[in-house]
Image (spheres, grey):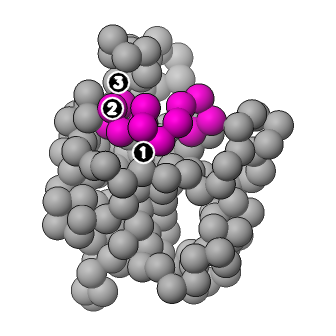
Amino acid sequence: MKILLDFDGVMITTPTWQKVDHLEDGFMVFNESCVENLARVIAITQADIVLTTTHRIHYNEKEWQQIFYNRGIITDRISKVNQARTFTDLSIRCLEVLEWVAANPNENYVIIDDDKSLRDLPIEIKSRWVETQFHQGLTEDCSKQALNILLGDD
């Protein structure tokens, strides 16, 4: 199982007009309730994380493991949706997700993101998308929806 994960509007919910706090590792603080909700999904599913966030270009997978650990999320299985290394390498999220799904046709996955471009996904992929709201992030209801998608519950 895979969780295609964004940060802004999912794990980071600080309003745009406020300064975002950073931990000692130099990366932004995650919303505590979002951390609890993601940690619960991972604990139940043992899902791997696939970073879709644009922030992914700043650190390698090992560094991301430490960043997650510093925020209370224990996982040693982190990858990236693609190998983009600069902002110019990044595409729109919808296309990046489409490419990842095409390259991983047999994966059980959920997309957790607030990016509105995902509304353009084909219905069979869009049905695996949990759309978060920027200032709320990964709520308990969103985490339940993610679990339903991964576990095949209705």
Q: Earlier in the sequence, mark 2 or mark 1?
A: 1
Was residue 61 drawn as part of the magenta stretch in this picture?
A: yes
Q: x and y percent of residue 30 in the render? A: 33, 31
Q: x and y percent of residue 5 in the render? A: 46, 53
Q: Residue furthest front?
A: 62
Q: x and y percent of residue 138 in the render? A: 34, 50
Amino acid residing under circle 1? Val
Secondary-structure class at tag 2: helix
Question: Label 2 neighbourhood size at 10 Å, few (<14), some (14-19), many (20+)?
Answer: some
Q: In this orientation, does residue 141 appear?
A: no
Was residue 83 drawn as part of the magenta stretch in this picture?
A: no
Q: Is residue 127 above or below residue 11?
A: below
List the residue tagged with mark 2: 66
For marks 3 and 2, give the CA distance: 13 Å
List the residue tagged with mark 3: 29
Amino acid residing under circle 2? Gln
- Judged by depth in the image, the label closer to the viewer, 2 or 1, is 2
Magenta stretch, main secondary structure, is helix
Residue range highlighted in magenta? 56-68
Residue drawn at x 24%, y 59% is 42
For marks 1 and 3, give the CA distance: 12 Å
Residue 111: mark: none
Secondary-structure class at tag 3: loop
Amino acid residing under circle 3? Val
Residue drawn at x 71%, y 37% is 85
Residue drawn at x 43%, y 21% is 27
Q: Describe residue 97's horizontal placement relative to residue 40 as left or right.
A: right
The residue nearer to you, when weighing 76 against 125, is 76
Q: Earlier in the sequence, mark 1 or mark 3?
A: 1
For marks 2 and 1, give the CA distance: 19 Å
List the residue tagged with mark 1: 10
